[in-house]
Amino acid sequence: MAAVSVASYAILGMQAAMLLTMLYGVHLARARRRMRRHGAVMTGLAVLNVATVAAVMAPTFYGLDPAPGPSSPSIILVHHYLGLMALAITAVVAFPWALRGANEGNCPGAGRRGRLIMRATFAIWVASLLLGIGAFFSL
Ligand code: HEM
């Protein structure tokens, strides 16, 4: 394993904590039907995710030596692209809702289509988090 910075260890712990918080957020929606609180938890996580990617993950990825090329089928690259997808989809799902006042009435999860969007967002995000944890141990 290559030399790993303290920041990377901190991000690893944070990713694990985010995964657990995300499961709590899903519990709020599914079992307790607390949609506003669910939205707030998920939006907070999405903001934290953007911050950790910008502060540590992107600089680490682009500073890797040798930099993983697009033809390298490494776990880091899959994590990288899934992570970018997760950033985009969570931003599209959560931020407009928060900017419109975070009301229960305009939840992006409402209806059959909303539930599908929720499940897809969750699946991509969890996959990218798990691969990120895997990528850490593959460095
Ligand atoms: C951006 C990150 C988010 C993720 C990963 C996420 C994930 C999920 C998941 C996994 C479910 C359970 C779906 C099921 O029943 O199987 C759910 C339900 C739901 N979410 Fe989200 N959510 C997010 C953001 C939001 C936001 C910002 C709101 C706004 C209030 C919201 C509103 C809802 C609603 C209303 C449901 C209930 C759907 C239903 O059972 O009919 N979600 N979400």
Image (cartoon, helix red, strand yellow):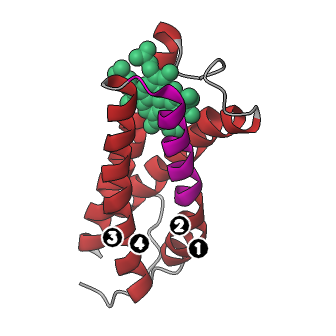
Taking the magenta stretch, the answer to whether it contains residue 46 is yes
Q: Quadrant of the N terminus?
A: bottom left
Q: Classify mark 4: residues with Cα within 10 Å, few (<14), some (14-19) or many (20+).
A: many
The residue carrying mark 3 has its beta carbon less than 8 Å from ligand 1: no
Report, in whole angstroms, how far the alpha carbon at label 4 lies from the one at label 2: 7 Å
Q: Is residue 41 left or right of residue 54?
A: left
Q: Which mark is residue 52?
A: 2
Q: Quadrant of the C terminus?
A: bottom left
Q: Which mark is residue 55?
A: 1
Q: Are marks 1 and 4 in contact (CB under 8 Å)?
A: no
Residue at x-position 42% and y-position 44%: 125
Residue tagged by mark 3?
A: 13
Residue 120 visible in the snapshot: no
Q: Which residues are magenta?
A: 33-49
Residue type indicated by callout 3: Gly
Q: Which corner quadrant of the image does residue 96 belong to? A: top right
Q: Is residue 128 left or right of residue 60?
A: left
Residue type indicated by callout 1: Ala
Q: Earlier in the sequence, mark 4 or mark 2?
A: 4
